[in-house]
Image: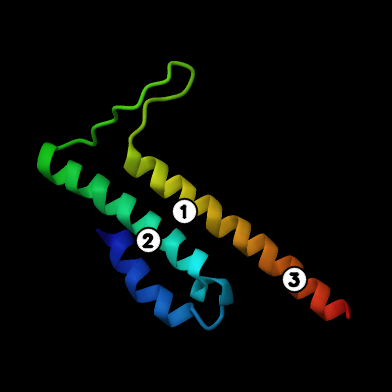
Amino acid sequence: VFAIILIFFAIPFFSHNIPFINTRLGIIALGLIVGGTIGNLIDRVRLGHVTDFLDFGFWPTFNVADSAIVIGVISLIIMLFLSEKNLRQSADD
């Protein structure tokens, strides 16, 4: 719950400092993170634990909400690195 509240209050406050957050991909990535967090929170409140049901044998068991969170975070990290690279190239020109 704290993470969701933090995201909802921090993003508008810091969005002018983090330009890639205001892009379509940034909004989708944040949506994946918040949606996955809410999905896991619903399981935690309803069942007392998070149900992991995807098991491929060679990887730890996980669920769709976990996948959404990981994909969202990886997307934000990639956007951060690409944004930093573009800023450095602009400064060199």
- Residue 67's quadrant in the figure? top left
The residue labelled by disc 1 is 72
> What type is the residue that disc 3 sits on?
Asn
Contact between labelled residues 2 and 3, with CB atoms less than 8 Å apart: no
Residue 55 is left or right of residue 48, and the answer is right
Residue 48 is left or right of residue 70, and the answer is left
Q: Position of residue 15 (x, y in %)?
A: 49, 79
Q: Position of residue 58 (x, y in %)?
A: 49, 17
> What type is the residue that disc 1 sits on?
Gly
Q: Earlier in the sequence, mark 1 or mark 3?
A: 1
The residue labelled by disc 2 is 31
> What type is the residue that disc 2 sits on?
Gly
Contact between labelled residues 2 and 1, with CB atoms less than 8 Å apart: yes
Name the residue located 18 percent from the left edge and 42 percent from the top edge: 43
Residue 81 sits above or below residue 91 on the image: above
Residue 15 sits above or below residue 82 on the image: below
- Disc 3 crowd, CA 10 A, few/some/many (<14, 14-19, 20+): few
Q: Secondary structure at mark 2?
A: helix
- Disc 2 crowd, CA 10 A, few/some/many (<14, 14-19, 20+): some
The dot on residue 86 is 3
Name the residue located 29 percent from the left edge and 27 percent from the top edge: 53
Q: Secondary structure at mark 3?
A: helix
Q: CA distance from mark 3 to mark 2?
A: 24 Å
Q: Position of residue 36 (x, y in %)?
A: 33, 50
Q: Secondary structure at mark 1?
A: helix
Residue sitting at the far front = 24
Q: Earlier in the sequence, mark 3 or mark 2?
A: 2
Q: CA distance from mark 1 to mark 2?
A: 8 Å
- Residue 32's quadrant in the figure? bottom left
Q: Earlier in the sequence, mark 1 or mark 2?
A: 2
Check the picture and name the quadrant holding the C terminus: bottom right
